[in-house]
Image (cartoon, helix red, strand yellow):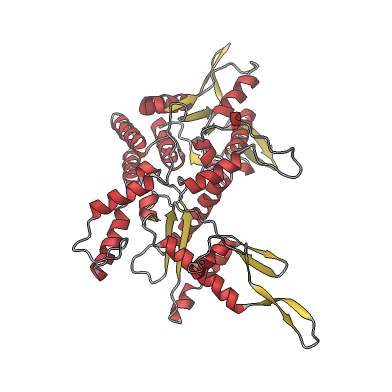
Amino acid sequence: MVSNAFENVFKSLQEFNNNKTFVKVQFLFPYIYSDFVYTLIEAENSGNFHSFKDSPFDLNFSKLRNMDMADIYSSLIHIAQKNSLEHIQSFIEKYELNFEKNVNTIQVRFTPIGLNICTFRINNTFFTDPILATRKDINRNKLSITYPLNCFTKEVVNLHGEYIVNKYDFEKVKECTDGLEGNFEYLWHHPSTLYCKDATEYDGQDGLLSKIRRPNELHLDQKVLRLNDAWKKNQEDIHHHHLISKFNPASWKGRIRYWLKDHLRDININRGDNEVIFISCCWVKVTSSHYSPSKEAISIKNWLLEDFNRSVKVILLDVNPGMFISEELYEKLNSATLGIFLLTSEIKVIDHDNEIEYSRPNIYHEVGYLMARLKSWNNGGILPLVSNMVNTGSNLMDQSKRTLNLEILESNYIHVLDWLNRTAVFLSKEEIILAVKKHIVRVDLNPHIETEYKEKLKLLLGEIIK
């Protein structure tokens, strides 16, 4: 609903501009690796919350544990923020709001400071936090705030002498909106607030706005550039408000990084925090009593292990059909963080004179199981590689399907690398770049591969490096 409302505004940009009205939208998100967000995620995952239906609160220190990346990426705040940023990027690209000369703009920033403003409604009465009135009450010389909430309405008497509540107190409403605007402006221009090009992989043209940089990967170049421009205009230090002879980017970076160090958190990725990639395929009969995974699946597995060394663990079951493997299968599926599914034509069915091609039933079952398990963790963690006209089923319609090439195996791996660059959580950008370079060498050594695939690889490498 909110997304549709915003899009209706952008659809009317030409009409606004014709009337000399220009649209400027500012989005301020909490930085996902800040203390503020971590406390929300810890509370979401805690088993110590009490409700009226539960037994009394029981403090159990054995329940305390360190958070890992799975906790962050499966949290409601991360999922909601990721979806919002994906919508925003689609608006930016669709309505060309990333061009510097465009008079209509969307700006996105991230703050490590808590966004703890709350406004709620009871019947027709609106209430808001007293924090919005702190600027007004700063000179009252009182230690405590004596009222818990500001009310937007007031009681008035009508002509019959009756009290009527819910009459808007426009003075209070303006006081609140001024407070909201003032609080937003404070956070928007705060020295610790991060610009989207510094905090995400998005550079204004390429990359993903929803891919947030971790604290050790943060850039401050964009912010320094803006602050330097501001200094040139007014010769005034943004932070200390006194005139200085010259803006020093290195000094500013050092000060802000020192401040951020005490307000951000990061997860140290250990050996347990690596990508576990489950590969599902149809087995091929080798002898009368032995079956083996397809050559396409084996090649992808070998290249992943060769290119990423210990950063990935690849699961490719190699058993004979008919063996009881349910327990082992679900154990492997439950440990996977990503899944690659090779859907080859194995079964053909005639339906109303139309021939429909299907893969083996176990492939559809495994992809459905892993999709459901990864839904809250990594919604793009499924890569279906589909050959010919194989029916994928309705549950894969919204997934990024790629064509499975049964002749040129190296082309399938290009899809895998591109997908890992977009979805992998535990692989660094440097590791993916190195893997692409290794595959370029691998492709160059194969004289049967067309130039088209070589160019695709080089294009992919260029996109990742950006």
Q: Quadrant of residue 48?
A: top right
Instruction: Point out residue 142 in the picture as x, y percentages from the top left corner.
Output: 53, 64
440 lies above or below 26 = above
For the question of whether residue 12 can be seen, the reply is yes
Q: Residue at x 51, y 72 (%)?
A: 178
* Residue 207 point in image, percent of width and height: 39, 50
Q: Nearer the viewer, residue 450 or 161?
A: 161
Residue 296: x %, y % from top left:
46, 27
Between residue 431 and residue 164, name the one nearer to us: 164
In this rendering, position of residue 169 left or right of residue 132: right
Decide if residue 219 is in sight here.
Answer: no
* Residue drawn at the location 54% of the way across and 32% of the way down: 65
Q: State left or right for residue 101 relative to residue 384.
A: left
The residue closer to the viewer here, 221 or 13, is 221
Q: Which residue lies furthest to the bottom in this view?
A: 159
Q: Does residue 428 sit above or below 293 in this rendering?
A: below
Residue 249 found in image quarter: bottom left
Relative to 340, say whether 395 is above or below.
below
What residue sits 54% from the left and 71% below the top? 177
Residue 67: x %, y % from top left: 51, 35
